[in-house]
Image (tube, rainbow, N blue to C red):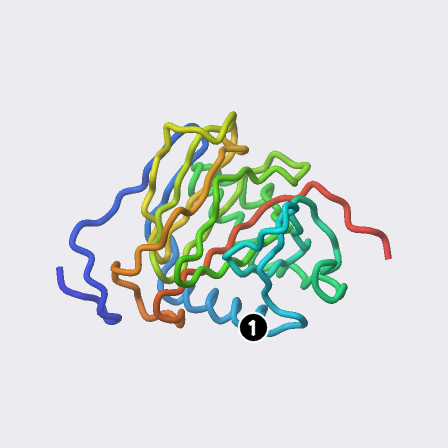
Amino acid sequence: MGPDDDGVLELIPRPRRTIGPGVVHLPGWLGLPAQRRLVEAARGWARQGPGARRATLPGGARMSVETVCLGWHWIPYRYSRTRDDQDGSPVQPFPGWLAELGAEAVADAYGDPDARATYRPDVALVNSYRGDARLGMHQDREERASDPVVSLSLGTACVFRIGSPHHRRGPFHDVELCSGDLLVFGGENRLVHHGVPRLLPERDVPRIGTDPGERLNLTLRVSGLEAPSS
């Protein structure tokens, strides 16, 4: 097999994997046009209002990952409809086309065509990793709904670490996520501890509009929260 039109050589196709109950990895789920569209959209979201920011944790430390939120603004560890840790402006809306993409992702991961109608994400965290940025082990537990979490990777590859839903300690399962990969976790592992200990800048990256060494990740969630009435 030769390199494709973007100069990326993939010698051995990576099969889909069920890593644990409710945790499914679909390598290369996003084609190049879809990846480019997401990168372009992420750039546009980052230009709106106060843009991306490195969130401050309750103890005062700042995250190394830059984040833009859609639908609901995530502040460790709560949601708001306004960017309270920035300029207080309304959070950017969650686009319908992105919700449809998330529903398609869950349907494909779980082999459940009904998910195309029943999975309705209303939160997206668009994370940008550069240099030595990483994400410590944590749970996505601010949501009031138990629907699965959808993770879409773009650009530079990374090590995605999966642990236990009960504690931060090992054993851990490390998964290499490359550009275009989809990871879904739900069911008994909806609250699994997970993180990104490091990027893998030596891996080949397709030309989709990311900067050298940059990883973009879109995490889609169902908040279970009700928007305030207008």
Of the 4 image quadrants, the one containing the N terminus is bottom left
Instruction: State the residue at coordinates (46%, 28%).
Output: 164
Instruction: Specify the amino acid type for callout 1.
Output: Gly
Relative to 157, 123 lies left or right: right
- Outermost residue toward the left in this view: 1
Instruction: State the residue at coordinates (61%, 37%).
Output: 141
Relative to 200, 227 lies left or right: right
Q: In which quarter of the image is residue 69?
A: bottom right
Measuring from the top left, give residue 39's x and y in whole percent.
46, 67
86 or 7, which is in the foreground? 86
Instruction: State the residue at coordinates (59%, 54%).
Output: 124
Measuring from the top left, give residue 146's x and y in whole percent.
61, 34
Relative to 161, 188 lies left or right: right
Disc 1 element:
helix
157 or 60, which is in the foreground? 60
Instruction: State the residue at coordinates (68%, 55%).
Output: 73
* Residue 27, above or below 163: below
Q: Quadrant of residue 25?
A: top left
Q: In which quarter of the image is residue 204?
A: bottom left
Of the 4 image quadrants, the one containing the C terminus is bottom right
Measuring from the top left, give residue 187's x and y in whole percent.
52, 30
Residue hosting label 1: 44
Measuring from the top left, give residue 80's x and y in whole percent.
73, 52
